[in-house]
Structures are given as structure tokens and as C-alpha cells.
Image (cartoon, helix red, strand yellow):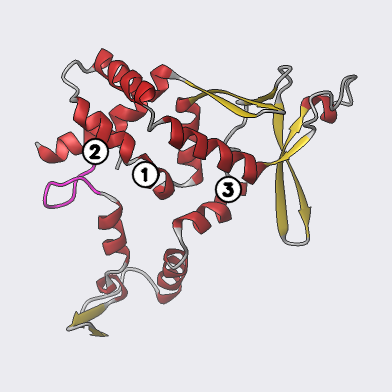
Amino acid sequence: MANGALNKRGKPIDKGFLYKLFRNRLYLGEAVHKGTSYPGEHKAIIDQLLWDQVHAILKESPRQRAANTRAKTPALLKGLIFTATGIAMTPTATKKGSRLYRYYTSMDAIQNRAGEGTDGFVRLNAGMVEGAVVQHIRSLLRTPEIVARAVETARRTDPDMDERDVVTALAGFDGLWESLFPAEQARIARLLIERVTVSSDGLAVDLRTEGLGSVIREMVTPKQRQAA
């Protein structure tokens, strides 16, 4: 989708197109008439087991699919999160039975260095802090200051960028984020986030201006291509 792939009608391949593709029973060697499927005269190109596995995944919500695959992908805030005194917090995990518990742990604590725990943040629940950071980004992207910065940054590389397209793209960020797999969310996070600082006052998120422009261009360009 990000590479500009088109379907046979010349339109960009989007999530809706893929869902329709995954539900096409022709690939099982069946024919469908008025909502009922019958054995077709053509050969199946996938077997029933693969079909069932794909549809078991599709039954889950995007949020649940992300949770199920998060442990297999880079931590969302790896290399981005620090304590107020500048100590890096690195992804760690423990497993109890079949459950994996993820954290961001202070390097002071990991290396048993003097000063361990001086910030009061030795270990944080990864899911909670990642959720708080994403919510903070969503709130920032709605502020007039960030919208103005986004328009300015996007226009540096594309002077013809329409301000309304930028505003629309920012408004659609929530839906875009929920549709992404964890690996893609991690890539977007690295484009958007300069640094996350954890202190007794809460979380502070510094956005990358140039990264903001890159994300906007990725969101706007497919729409412009489709309109053309």
C-alpha cells in the first residue's frame, strides 16, 4: 500500500480491498450464489486450513492483533524513553506461564549502578507507558501549534501541499494508527518522537518536526494519487 500498488481498476490497494480479497471463497475452489457457496469447477489455490487460520485472525480486533504480535516486534519506545536525569530505559520482559509481561527498565537498575532508582522509576509497565505516549501524541496532533508546524514542514518538500489535506490527514491519524501492525507503528513512532521523558510530573513527549512532515506526506500522497 505504501509503495503505490494499484488494483485492477487502477485504484490504490487499501485495507478494505484486502479484507474483501481475504473473504473471497473462489480461492477455496468454491462458487458463491446469493450468499451460499457451492463446490466450483475450478481448482482451489489455498486449502481449508490456511483459510481457517486467516479468518481466525480477521475475527480479532485490530487492537487485539497488535497485542498478540507486539512481543515479536521492536518495542515501540526502544531508544526513545529516558528518566528525568537522562538515564535510558530499555525494554525488558518476564514470562509467567504462557503470559509475557513487558517493561521499560532503567539502565541503572539493569547494571546495578550507583544512583539506582533516584528518579523513582526503576521499571514501568510497557503497555501502559506506550498507551500513554500514543494518547499524548494524538492530543498534540490536534493542537493549532502542531497543525501549523505540520503544514510548514510538509510544504518544505512539497510547496503545493494543500493545508486542508494536512488537516484532514492529522484528523485521521487515530484510525490510521489502529490499522497498523506493531512493526509499522514502531516505524511511525521513530519518525514522530524525538524523546520521551518520564518524571514525577508525568510524561513529556518531544516531537520530531521533520518526522512529522514525513508522516503527513505518507498520509496525504495516496489520497492525492487516488483523486488524480
Q: Crowdedness of circle 3 by 10 Å Cα count: few (<14), some, many (20+)?
A: some
Q: Secondary structure at mark 1?
A: helix
Q: Secondary structure at mark 3?
A: helix
Which of the image's four quarters has the C terminus?
top left
The percent position of residue 116, horizontal first and vertical second, equals 86, 25
Numbered label attached to residue 176: 1
Is disc 1 in contact with disc 2, using a CB cutoff of under 8 Å?
Answer: no
Numbered-mark total: 3
Question: Which residue is disc 3 drawn over?
Answer: 70
Question: Which residue is disc 2 drawn over?
Answer: 4
Residue that appears at 44% across and 73% down: 52
- Magenta stretch, residue numbers: 4-13
Per the model, the C-alpha gap separating discs 3 and 2 is: 26 Å
The majority secondary structure of the magenta stretch comes to loop
Give the image quarter of residue 167: top left
Between 49 and 101, the residue placed more toward the observer is 101
